[in-house]
């Protein structure tokens, strides 16, 4: 069994206490500030724009829910449903919390934020393309927001641990 001296244990204790403290602050900011802001963006900016662009002959319908904009549309004869909300969601939160314990370099946090910002812009662009009448835009919104962004977000952490960006 390995033995540690008191200084090593104290240093690890301080390291973990700081990380847990910052993690709690991030959780508080996420749930008390960002989630309501994200909801406000969805309900007060995204939904009114889509509703304004929708005409009587649109091949889709929209509904504003508590957390997202729900779009029902038809693609190749099948009815589909898309739940849209801006990025920087749950997977972003998990990646930030894990990165706290992995690295202190800010560039990885900037990479993560840049990834989500680009994904947000792309999903919004494809959402507008879908609203304009091209149903493949809705498919791409679902693919990027539902699969690509979470996969890239969760892949970033092991790549940082491995040192792939050094």
Image (spheres, grey):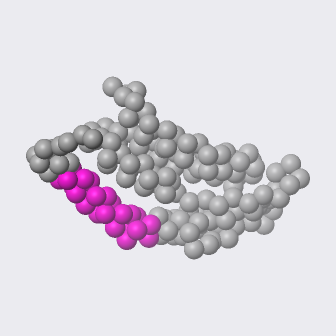
Image quadrant of residue 54? Answer: bottom right
User: Which residue is farthest front?
Assistant: 1
Q: Is residue 161 left or right of residue 13?
A: right
Task: State the quadrant of the C terminus.
Answer: top left
Whether the magenta-drawn stretch holds residue 19 is answered as yes
Q: Is residue 143 above or below residue 166?
A: below
Q: Is residue 106 above or below residue 80?
A: above
For image coordinates 42% across by 40% down, the residue present is 157
Q: Is residue 162 left or right of residue 62?
A: left
How many numbered marks are there? 0
Task: State the quadrant of the N terminus.
Answer: top left
- x and y, in percent, of residue 16 in the image: 25, 53
Image quadrant of residue 62? Answer: bottom right
- x and y, in percent, of residue 102 in the image: 33, 42
- x and y, in percent, of residue 164 in the image: 40, 27
26 and 101: which is toward the camera: 101
143 and 23: which is toward the camera: 23
Report whether residue 141 is seen. no
Q: Is residue 48 left or right of residue 26?
A: right
Image quadrant of residue 33? Answer: bottom left
For image coordinates 52% across by 57% down, the residue present is 86
Residue bounds of the magenta highlight = 13-37
For image coordinates 51% across by 49% down, the residue present is 120
User: Which residue is farthest left?
Assistant: 7
Q: In terms of secondary structure, what is the magenta stretch mainly? A: helix
Whether the magenta-drawn stretch holds residue 31 is answered as yes
């Amino acid at each position: 069994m390995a033995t540690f001296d008191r200084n090593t244990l104290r240093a690890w204790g301080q390291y973990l206490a700081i990380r847990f403290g910052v993690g709690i602050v991030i959780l508080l900011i996420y749930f008390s500030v960002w989630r309501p802001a994200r909801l406000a963006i969805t309900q007060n900016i995204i939904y009114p724009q889509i509703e304004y662009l929708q005409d009587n002959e649109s091949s889709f319908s929209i509904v504003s829910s508590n957390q997202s904009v729900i779009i029902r549309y038809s693609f190749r004869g099948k009815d589909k449903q898309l739940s849209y909300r801006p990025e920087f969601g749950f997977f972003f939160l998990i990646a930030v919390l894990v990165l706290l314990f992995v690295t202190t370099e800010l560039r990885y946090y900037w990479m993560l934020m840049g990834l989500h910002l680009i994904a947000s812009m792309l999903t919004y662009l494809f959402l507008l393309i879908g609203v304009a009448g091209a149903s493949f835009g809705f498919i791409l919104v679902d693919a990027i927001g539902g699969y690509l962004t979470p996969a890239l977000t969760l892949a970033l952490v092991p790549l940082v641990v491995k040192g792939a960006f050094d």
